[in-house]
Amino acid sequence: MNPQNNNPRNGQNQPNSRQKKSRFPRLNFLNSLATVVLVFLLIVTFYTEFSSKNVPSTSIPLSSLAGDIKKGIVTSLSIQDTQVVATYADKSTKVADRETDSSLTDSLTRFGVTPAELASTTLSVLAPSGTWYWIGQLAPFIVPLLFLALFVWMLTRQMRGAGMQAMSFGQSKARITMPDDVKQKVTFKDVAGAKEAKQELSEIVDFLKNPKKFIEIGAEIPKGVLLMGAPGTGKTLLARAVAGEAGVAFFSISGSEFVEMFVGVGASRVRDLFNMAKQSAPAIVFVDEIDAVGRARGSGTGGGNDEREQTLNQILVEMDGFEQNQKVIVMAATNRPDVLDPALLRPGRFDRRVTIDLPDRGDREAILTVHSKKKQFAEDVNLKVVAERTPGFSGADLASLMNEAAILAAREDRKTIGQFDLIRSIEKVMLGPERKSHVLSPKEKEITAYHEAGHAIVASVLPNADPVHKISIISRGRAAGYTLKLPFEERRLQSRLEFLDDIAMSLGGYVAEKMIFGDITTGASNDLQVSTALARDMVTKYGMSDKIGPIALESAGGRVLFGMGVSDREYSEKVAADIDAEVSKIMTEARERAVKTLADHKKAFEAVSKRLIETETIEREEYEKIIVAQGIPLKREAKIV
């Protein structure tokens, strides 16, 4: 399955116009305030430049000016407010301050200037007038008032915007993909695998395209479709493909986006979302991770006023309110269908449930082919081999695998992706990147080699364990080493004998350390956790204990309290003791089988361990040559006749 563009929450989808408003009103207010201050400073600057006089640079006292008039070198006098500008015969100008309590003539007469000498000069008075004069006079009063008015207007505008945002708090935040959006359109051709799921969903496509033939015959198309499957299997992608095939509007929202700290907001958003969908009908409303809001009611701490329960109630009401020819279909996705409220799953709501399984070998090859369209591959690439080595991978895992292979090739400055890159990327996705800086000491390297060899030999000898494909003591992620074993064929069911051999194989490293070194390390901690959990599931879930019998004592899922899983135990202390005894018995018998296996094939065990110390990694071909040389027959794939 192709999980590209699987997330409709990317920025390329067309947003609702009501979502274009900024979510940071405080930042907008500060920006507006800064704009106002800047405008005010510019006005003050222009006013200062306008009001400044172009006065001469030379200033002289009035007595000196009177002396120059007596000498006859002053040709004209100009009175400007409290200043006298004198123009000399050499075209230069000088300025002098005049007395404000008397006229210029009286002042010059007191300095000895006769009327005849004063008459030889031209005297003019420049009285300020006109528009600019009045602007200059009123500007000191008007500019502050204008600035204050502008500030109040900006403040009011911001408060009005905040009020509008408060009013839009209960509006839906769904992402909308319109049918004419070619760039975001996804069809069934873009989805590899999931044949049964696509066949189920094709009925929904047919109804959205041709609703008349269903309505005329009296058929009612399901109002809700629940997509169930493990994470990464392509539930969201399939929902988008249905909208793309039908050519209808696609409204996508996450279940967690309904719930807010204020009671009633989620219900308001639900109403707004369904109103938008009805106006755009035919349309698909897709709620991703619906278990965030659709969990069984009655377990919350808020009772009837709990926000999540209010939101769920509104969803139930809206789905009941659909008319038969509404042409709006609700699709939802979850990987926890067991926790959903029964009212969601009753007929008339999410009564059509589509299970999307992990892809099998053929589907994985098809998914890899889809993701290889834009990749540059070398000639040695064989996607069939990659598909065989990735059982249990989801579509998202396979997409990550292809991307990691491209990154590895680009990091090494190569233009094409080789098969070796794909194989390395499988291990990187499964276990994490190589920890080349985590160098083991010679003693730790020896312990790790014997530990992994113990896993491999037990897996190769026990008849119901999967064959070994690779052994490595190079650290990856949190593992100091690893043994990769893969089944010959896809399995949907596992038997009791297979579980017992898996537990014995998991204890092979623990037994190998104790057998060779007489001590055990912390390297077996994860093996013990996995094998003990499997043994307990055999007893409490699968009825694989002769003493306890065919009784399921624990459910598949439990409650969560303070981050810890809490199971609802419904059995007595005596039964609990019997369970512990049975788990201990399974683990003890598995350890004894691992001890016997390594003791009987000690030569092969030693040979594999020493080879691991030398090369750090052993591939399947080399490993099989070693064990065959030591008398261990190879496992062959069973042929169906």
Image (cartoon, helix red, strand yellow):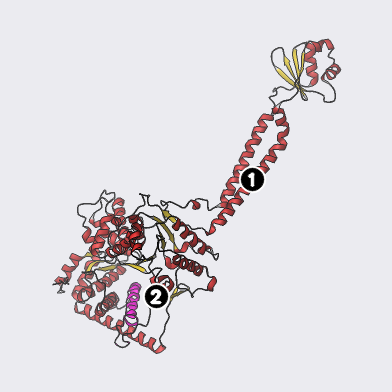
User: Between residues 325 and 38, which one lies in front from this camera angle?
Assistant: 325
Question: Of the residues shown, which amino acid type is indicated by label 1?
Answer: Trp
Would residue 341 be visible to someone looking at this image?
no
The percent coordinates of residue 272 (x first, y second) are 49, 59
Q: Residue at x 80, y 16 (%)?
A: 66
User: Between residues 416 and 219, which one lies in front from this camera angle?
Assistant: 219
Q: Residue at x 80, y 11 (%)?
A: 119
Query: Does 606 appear above or below 22?
Result: below
Magenta stretch secondary structure, dominant: helix
Q: Secondary structure at mark 1?
A: helix
Would residue 59 be visible to someone looking at this image?
yes
The percent coordinates of residue 386 (x first, y second) are 24, 61
Query: Does 582 appear above or below 273?
Result: below
Looking at the image, the residue that sits furthest to the bottom is 574
Q: Where is residue 351, by image quadrant?
A: bottom left
Q: Where is residue 116, by image quadrant?
A: top right
Which mark is on residue 153? 1
Give the magenta part as a residue range: 522-551
Residue at image mark 2: 557
The percent coordinates of residue 232 (x first, y second) are 34, 63
Q: Which quadrant holds the N terminus?
A: bottom left
Mark with earlier residue (2, 1): 1
The verdict on residue 92 being magenta is no
| Residue 378 as seen in the image, left or right of residue 535 | left
The percent coordinates of residue 103 (x first, y second) are 83, 21
Residue neighbourhood size for the residue with mark 2, other residues' Cα within 10 Å, grouped as few (<14), some (14–19), many (≥20):
few
Cα separation between marks 2 and 1:
58 Å
